[in-house]
Image (cartoon, helix red, strand yellow):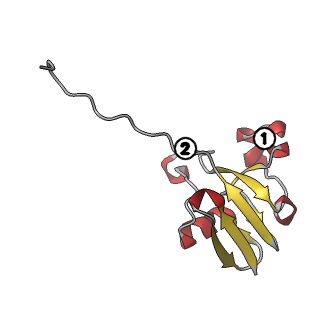
């Protein structure tokens, strides 16, 4: 079994089978890694492996299209492409951008 801690989701920790896909674990266990992959926005599931990078599989060609060598050196991966082979990982991700409040239409009195 592997252990995944979702730092950006208040440190929620879950267990899954060895060699599990990080995004699938997040979706199944409500880990919170943001993604819009199905909507055609590839690269939106980027996350940072804070601990346990050695417990992940090799970097995939698709990740190389969206991340730089400096990103990889800093622990960034794409959750949809990353498998946790064994052991434990802790992941974080950038906060979602906040949507500004809608502006009133027409003259403001």
At x 84%, y 66%, the residue is 55
Q: Which of these two is toward me, 13 or 1?
A: 13
Badge 1 is on which residue? 71
The picture places residue 6, in percent across and down from the top left corner, at 64, 63
At x 74%, y 47%, the residue is 63
Q: Which of these two is toward me, 47 or 19?
A: 47
Badge 2 is on which residue? 41
Q: Are marks 1 and 2 in contact (CB under 8 Å)?
A: no
- Which callout, 1 or 2, points to the residue nearer the camera? 1
User: Mark 1 vs mark 2: which is more N-terminal?
Assistant: 2
Asked if residue 70 lies left or right of residue 96, the reply is right
Q: Where the C terminus falls, by quadrant?
A: top left
Q: Residue 28 occupies which quadrant of the picture?
A: bottom right
Q: Which of these two is toward me, 60 or 25?
A: 25
Q: Residue 52 occupies which quadrant of the picture?
A: bottom right
Mark 2, other Cα within 10 Å: few <14 / some 14–19 / many ≥20? few
* Measured Cα–Cα span from mark 1 to mark 2: 19 Å
At x 51%, y 53%, the residue is 38
What's the mark number on residue 13? none
The picture places residue 45, in percent across and down from the top left corner, at 61, 51
């Amino acid at each position: 079994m592997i252990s995944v801690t979702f730092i950006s989701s208040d440190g929620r920790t879950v267990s899954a089978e060895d060699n599990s896909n990080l995004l699938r674990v997040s979706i199944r266990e409500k880990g919170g890694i943001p993604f819009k992959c199905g909507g055609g926005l590839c690269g939106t599931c980027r996350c940072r492996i804070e601990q346990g990078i050695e417990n992940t599989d090799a970097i995939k060609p698709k990740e190389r299209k969206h991340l730089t060598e400096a990103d990889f050196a800093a622990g960034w991966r794409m959750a949809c492409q990353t498998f946790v082979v064994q052991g434990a990982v802790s992941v974080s991700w950038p906060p979602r951008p906040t949507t500004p409040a809608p502006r009133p239409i027409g003259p403001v009195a």
